[in-house]
Image (tube, rainbow, N blue to C red):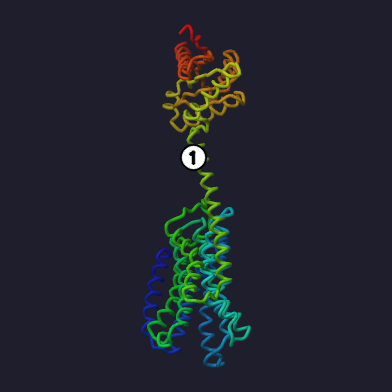
């Protein structure tokens, strides 16, 4: 039943919101309907939170408290109008309406922290770009006219400015939530949709306040804007009731989020707010917000530069990782054939220049196919990893052990003649784990042969070691006697 509870609630909320469009335009109908939907959402969130683990509850309780306070503000506002005859800010309802912002903001901060195991600079910068860009619009069209306007008391200005500031905080945290890591299920997207609905609703009220009075008094317009808040309440409740809500505060360990086309479009739009606003005001013949636009442009520029720098560092790290992966054997972690082919010519050139010996050894695990068939491929993989680690520990730090292919390995031993190289291979043979052995062939460079010819001589010695009974190291014959 619990798995379908969110669907039942979503259906009931949808029917209630549709029915809201049809009720009479009187406070006696509208206020109980709005408050009832808000309180029902808060109750559903709190009830769902109680079923979660203690670690996951607090953010949801905060969301429930914020929605309860906001919905209660509707009833208090009507009481202030009808009973106390309060029509100008601030009223007793404002603390309730504003209570949504700190409660939801603190809940989001807790959720973001729990969803990520380490600092996420990219997500912080991206959310800052979005917030500063659209915050500039809020400053120009809402905050500055209110804060420096006439006809309002200081308390009224503080309350009026508090709403757009609260919206900007929610916008920043919503963007941060979207750009961060953590589990992403249906509940995640319902929460995001609810926060977006709150922001859209508040924006609509601001736009509506600047329109013609005839438009403001249109029933369809008012009901539509009021319904956005009801949708936001309901979406939060649906998110809490969804089975995936209990894991929303958990980290996945992966914080990487690619730069999607949608994110790139949003960042571009936010970055263009300042220059587009400046162009519009210049076209109008009066740049009235030059200081704000200049500061906004500077901050956005620095944020974009910081984001580009972070992306470049990320690309460099990924390039290094790709290069390392291309030169490393996935199973054993040793150098692979590609790395070996780069290393051997350099070692031969050093030996030619300094007049020192250099040797190459090819070794092959004995009866590896039989081991695989007897114990299985996972055991064979473990043997390869353990054996290569044991051999590596017996070689000198200057020696290079690489996987040649399958159960065959190759060793580069700089400044080592046949005797020193054979001694090193015997130590490795003794250290072979699981009672296994290997056969090996060692060839010392004659100073003139090519890399392929040197390896071919080592391979010939390995072939002889195999045919001589395995579990031994043989030295290749000199190149002149081949």
Q: Nearer the viewer, residue 205 or 333?
A: 205
* Image-quadrant location for residue 90: bottom right
* Image-quadrant location for residue 91: bottom right
Which part of the image, by quadrant, shows the C terminus? Answer: top left
x and y percent of residue 149 in the render? 58, 83
Relative to 177, does residue 365 appear above or below in the rendering?
Answer: above
x and y percent of residue 383 in the render? 50, 28
Q: Is residue 377 among what the camera can see?
A: yes
Which part of the image, by quadrant, shows the N terminus? Answer: bottom left
Left or right of 211? Residue 146 is right
State the residue position of label 1: 322
Q: Is residue 472 among what the camera can see?
A: no
- Mark 1, Cα crowd under 10 Å, few <14 / some 14-19 / many 20+, is few
Q: Residue at x 50, y 42 (%)?
A: 319
Relative to 452, does residue 151 appear above or below in the rendering?
Answer: below
Q: Residue furthest front?
A: 285
x and y percent of residue 342 in the render? 50, 28
Relative to 280, does residue 112 appear above or below in the rendering?
Answer: above
Left or right of 436? Residue 262 is left
Left or right of 112? Residue 237 is left
Q: Residue at x 49, y 24 (%)?
A: 409
For numbered disc 1, what is the local secondary structure?
helix
């Amino acid at each position: 039943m619990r798995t379908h509870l969110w669907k039942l609630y979503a259906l009931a909320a949808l029917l209630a919101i549709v029915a809201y469009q049809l009720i009479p335009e009187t406070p006696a109908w509208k206020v109980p309907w709005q408050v009832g939907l808000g309180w029902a959402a808060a109750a559903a969130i709190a009830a769902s939170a109680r079923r979660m683990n203690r670690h996951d509850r607090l953010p949801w309780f905060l969301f429930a408290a914020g929605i309860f306070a906001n919905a209660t503000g509707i009833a208090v506002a009507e009481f202030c109008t009808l009973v106390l005859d309060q029509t100008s800010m601030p009223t007793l309802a404002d603390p309730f309406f504003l209570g949504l912002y700190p409660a939801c903001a603190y809940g989001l901060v807790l959720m973001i922290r729990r969803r990520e195991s380490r600092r996420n600079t990219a997500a912080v910068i991206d959310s800052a770009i979005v917030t500063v860009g659209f915050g500039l619009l809020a400053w120009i069209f809402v905050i500055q006219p209110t804060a420096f306007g006439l006809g309002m008391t200081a308390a009224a200005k503080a309350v009026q400015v508090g709403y757009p500031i609260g919206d900007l905080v929610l916008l920043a945290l919503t963007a941060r939530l979207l750009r961060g890591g953590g589990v992403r299920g249906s509940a995640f997207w319902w929460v995001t949709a609810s926060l977006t609905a709150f922001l859209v609703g508040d924006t609509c009220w601001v736009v509506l306040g600047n329109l013609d009075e005839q438009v403001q008094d249109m029933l369809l317009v008012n009901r539509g804007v009021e319904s956005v808040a009801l949708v936001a309440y309901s979406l939060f409740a649906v998110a809490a009731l969804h089975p995936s809500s209990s894991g929303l505060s958990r980290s996945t360990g992966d914080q990487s989020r690619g730069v999607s086309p949608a994110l790139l479009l949003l960042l571009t739009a936010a970055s263009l707010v300042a220059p587009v606003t400046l162009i519009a005001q210049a076209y109008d013949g009066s740049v009235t917000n030059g200081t704000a636009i200049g500061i906004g442009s500077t901050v956005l520029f620095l944020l974009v530069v910081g984001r580009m720098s972070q992306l470049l560092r990320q690309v460099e790290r990924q390039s290094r990782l790709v290069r390392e992966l291309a030169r490393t054997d996935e199973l054993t972690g040793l150098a692979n054939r590609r790395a070996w082919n780069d290393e051997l010519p350099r070692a031969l050139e050093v030996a030619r220049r300094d007049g020192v010996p250099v040797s190459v050894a090819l070794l092959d695990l004995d009866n590896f196919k039989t081991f695989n068939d007897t114990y299985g491929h996972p055991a064979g993989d473990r043997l390869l990893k353990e054996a290569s680690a044991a051999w590596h520990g017996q070689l000198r730090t200057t020696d290079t052990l690489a996987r040649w292919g399958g159960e065959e390995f190759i060793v580069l031993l700089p400044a080592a003649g046949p005797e020193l190289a054979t001694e090193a291979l015997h130590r490795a043979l003794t250290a072979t784990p699981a009672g296994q052995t290997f056969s090996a062939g060692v060839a010392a460079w004659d100073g003139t042969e090519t890399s392929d010819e040197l390896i071919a001589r080592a391979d010939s010695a390995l072939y002889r070691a195999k045919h001589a009974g395995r579990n031994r190291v043989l030295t290749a014959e000199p190149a002149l006697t081949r």
